[in-house]
Image (tube, rainbow, N blue to C red):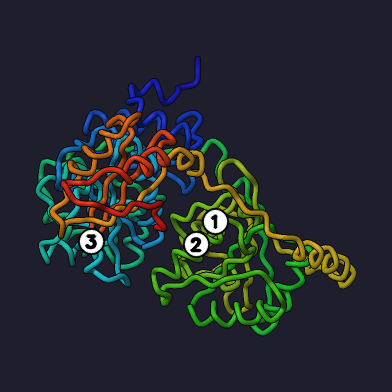
Amino acid sequence: MDKLKFKDFALSEDILESIEKLGYKNPSQVQEKVIPLIFKNKDIIVKSQTGSGKTAAFAIPICEKIELEEKNPQVLVLAPTRELALQIKEDFYDIGRFKRINCTAIFGKEPITTQIKELKQRTHVVVGTPGRTLDHIEKGTLSLKKIQYLIIDEADEMLNMGFIDQVKAVLDKLPKNRVTLLFSATIPQEILKLCAAYMNNPINIEIEAENPVINRINQIYYQIEAYKKFDLLNKLVYTQRPESCMIFCRTKKNVEDLVLQMKGKGYSCSALHGGMLQSERIDVMKRFKRGEFIFLVCTDVAARGIDVENITHIINYDIPMEKESYIHRIGRTGRAGKSGTAITFVTPKEYRFLEEIENSFNLTIEKGDVPSKEEVEKGKDIYREKLKAAPKIKKDKSNKLNKDITKIYISAGKKKKISPGDIAGTISSIDGINPEDVGIIEIQDNFSYVDILSGKGRTVLDGLKHKTIKGKSVRVEIAQK
């Protein structure tokens, strides 16, 4: 039988073009099962491992079904962490780029006023963490009256992080005649109760991984006294020579202490934890995804939803207290069919946690041999040479998508009574420009941003020099956003 292709789902050209440019080849197992059911507006409970392509499984059909002209949000996605919320927002934005779908992410540790401004724009999709989403609902700044789709992503993590009551509070305020989709790596009893209370005859889908991530990850542990951990880390770095590595610590203090020690040794590393400003967290993740440094030292905020290509090693510098966290941490490697290595440091007092992890998930985690002095010395020289070379910058999966798109800045906005129609009309009147070449338009108080598609950015920039928008002269340049 021929392998199913995305065009077999009767998707529009706008969606097919963006997923092809994003490098999606054939639908994954979860996409094959979920996409047709969303088209039929069925409530679904999906149990699926990390890295299975589930974000695209809901984003592709939902982008297809969104009504562009509707001003109020039609889709609400709840995610447990800010990193995951941003990743989902980017995926929706990329998949819906040519259809001009606008998406906003809302979460804590960022000024609520900025988010309120974004929500005043025409927004089709809102992705939020439960607490901040509830804040906006209570303030009346997030309209729920047109919500047709609610997606609860990483539901078991919402439960672990204590967000389940906030999720229920959001659910209680949503329109009853909506479609609800719940995605989770595990389905604990509490999640089943939530589904029974808030979902309408949900269809259960369990994705059995053809080649589970676990089978592609070489799992090793080292029993080590806490004060000897850093010495062992050095030995393993020199002998294993990671290309790209995430090191997990239990607390932000442990993260900061370890980064200081690693920088003292000249390692290429950066920290990521919940105490950082959101702008810093976004910047660190972008740089790590691009491969600008090798070691991301982090707390469990980075254990889920972060999709970075070719992470070769995961090191649990501190063993996780929550056994599910072990699976999510090591799931950052071995993605997209590749293999990876997961190393866990265990102090003698923590050994029972390791046994719990092995028993709960039916795993065999092998005891590692500490590298010999000769192996370390030999590896040290090779690794130092490698560090002298410039970092190999990874390509962003949306590069191909962005190649033909130019974001332009226009020095006029709401205060000059400029509307999206005014901007689209003026740009479309330029010789050689069609309405289809105008992408997402974002209007702020004093300025606006516009995506110009089809590689026609330069034509529009030149054309607008000789035109006014609503009778007003404007300054136009390539956006620095």
Provide residue 103's location: percent of width, then percent of height. 29, 49
- Report the amino acid beneath label 3: Asn
Residue on which disc 1 sits: 289
From the viewer's perspective, is residue 461 above or below residue 474? above
Residue on which disc 3 sits: 446
**Identity of the residue drawn at 78% across and 69% down:** 370
Q: Residues within 10 Å of mark 2 (few under 14, many from 20)?
A: some
Residue on which disc 2 sits: 285
- Report the amino acid beneath label 1: Lys
Mark 3, secondary structure of its residue: loop
Provide residue 151's location: percent of width, then percent of height. 27, 47
Q: How many marks?
A: 3
- Report the amino acid beneath label 2: Met
Q: Quadrant of the C terminus?
A: bottom left
**What whole-number distance in Å separates the C-alpha atoms at marks 3 and 2?**
30 Å
Front residue of 281/196: it is 281
From the viewer's perspective, is residue 452 above or below residue 50? above
Residue 178 seen anywhere in this rendered image of the structure: yes
